[in-house]
Amino acid sequence: MKPIRFGLVGYKFMGKAHANALSRLPMFFETDVPVERAVLCGRDAQWLEQAAATLGFSKTETDWRKLVEREDVDAIDITAPSNAHKEIALAAIKAGKHVFCEKPLALTAADAREMESAAMEAGVANQVGFNYRFAPALVLAKRLIDDGKIGRIFHFRGSFLQDWIIDPEFPKVWRLDKSVCGSGALGDLGAHVIDAARYLVGEIEEVSGAQTTFVKERPVVERMTGLSGKASADAPRAKVDVDDASAFIARFESGAMGLFEATRFAQGHKNDMRLEINGEKGSLRFEFERMNELWYFSAEDEPGEQGWRMIQVSEGIHPYWDRWWPAGHVIGFPETFAHELYEFAQRAAQGQACSPSFADGARVAEIMDAVELSARRRAWVAVGEV
Ligand code: SOE
């Protein structure tokens, strides 16, 4: 079968995660559609050459406009900061390429909807990078819910906690600049929780939110970095215009209640995404840092035997488990990217719809816009009102 040749935009944290995943696919998923790391794209020629050598790309391009037009590329994979997503994706779609785009899909719901419509009209494969869906325990949670094991769902409780910007001297990196990232903790972390909520429980109808920025000014770094960076003592300061923390309650269309929290100010929490779902017949609990384990309580167990049980989700449950290691040899964060890019490549090759698609990215963006508006108004907002 003809390979899917990837043009990857970006080579820092997410670029590396994607390049790593693409390099694993021929090694572990050898019987399916082959993927190729064809061209790496970034603005700075010198850094780009170094990155290409490290990440296993033989060809480079410093201009994404040229990348999307190249004949030796079938799919554009966008891991650049969020403000670049829309323009690159629209150009790639116009050039007839399949597009994979990191989350959040765009800076606003309106932009995300434009990307969704363009991809639908062009009929190209489109997928958004909600990689947490591909963690073993979440795949099992989805199956248990679909099989009716926990019955009617009453509550979804989800939080994503980190602690890397508590120091007020931590610089204003691009993830803290609204014009580049769209929103702060909400878009960076909350987007994953919202995606998980939609995936497991269904559509959200309305939200009531609150947001805050604890550190209102930060030093500016000369070179915009992702998750790190040091500013000199005399560096100028700039206003932080995104949320440091966001929280909201939600009503699902099904009638379930949702409680969401996203913050980068939770000391001691590094990449702590947690979910709990309570249904009529049982409950499920998940922590990302233990992503191979799902906690399950069934009210249908014999009364004397009821209790929370931890299911080690390895062999026999995750659709791709047998591609990796023998029983119980757990997988981690990097493999979630391999799973999502594997599905994207297969579906692009077979002309099938991808999931999560740009449409999912746009629905998540609508929910985030509604949360922001609700926080400003201090009132409930219907999703889709903005
Ligand atoms: C940084 O906060 C970050 O890497 C996010 O950008 C990712 O989407 C999430 O996986 C972990 O945290």
Image (tube, helix red, strand yellow):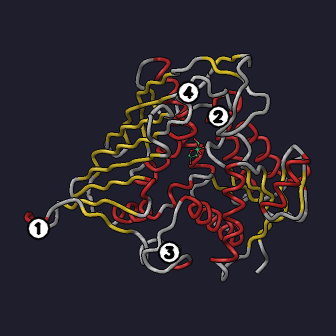
Which dot, 2 or 4, sits closer to the camera?
Answer: 4
The numbered disc on residue 167 is 4
The numbered disc on residue 133 is none
Secondary element at tag 2: helix
Left or right side of 104 for 329: left
Q: Determine which quarter of the picture holds residue 227.
A: top right
The kind of residue tagged 1 is Glu
Mark 1 neighbour density, 10 Å: few (under 14) some (14–19) many (20 or more): few
Mark 4 neighbour density, 10 Å: few (under 14) some (14–19) many (20 or more): few
Instruction: Report the front residue among 356 and 352.
Output: 356
The kind of residue tagged 3 is Trp
Residue at the spot of label 2: 175
In the image, is the residue at mark 2 within 8 Å of ligand 1 by its beta carbon? Answer: yes
The kind of residue tagged 2 is Arg
Left or right side of 86 for 160: left
Residue at the spot of label 1: 302
Which dot, 4 or 3, sits closer to the camera?
Answer: 4
Q: Earlier in the sequence, mark 2 or mark 3?
A: 2
The kind of residue tagged 4 is Asp
Q: Determine which quarter of the picture holds residue 73.
A: bottom right
Q: Earlier in the sequence, mark 2 or mark 4?
A: 4
Residue at the image position 51 percent from the left and 34 percent from the top: 264
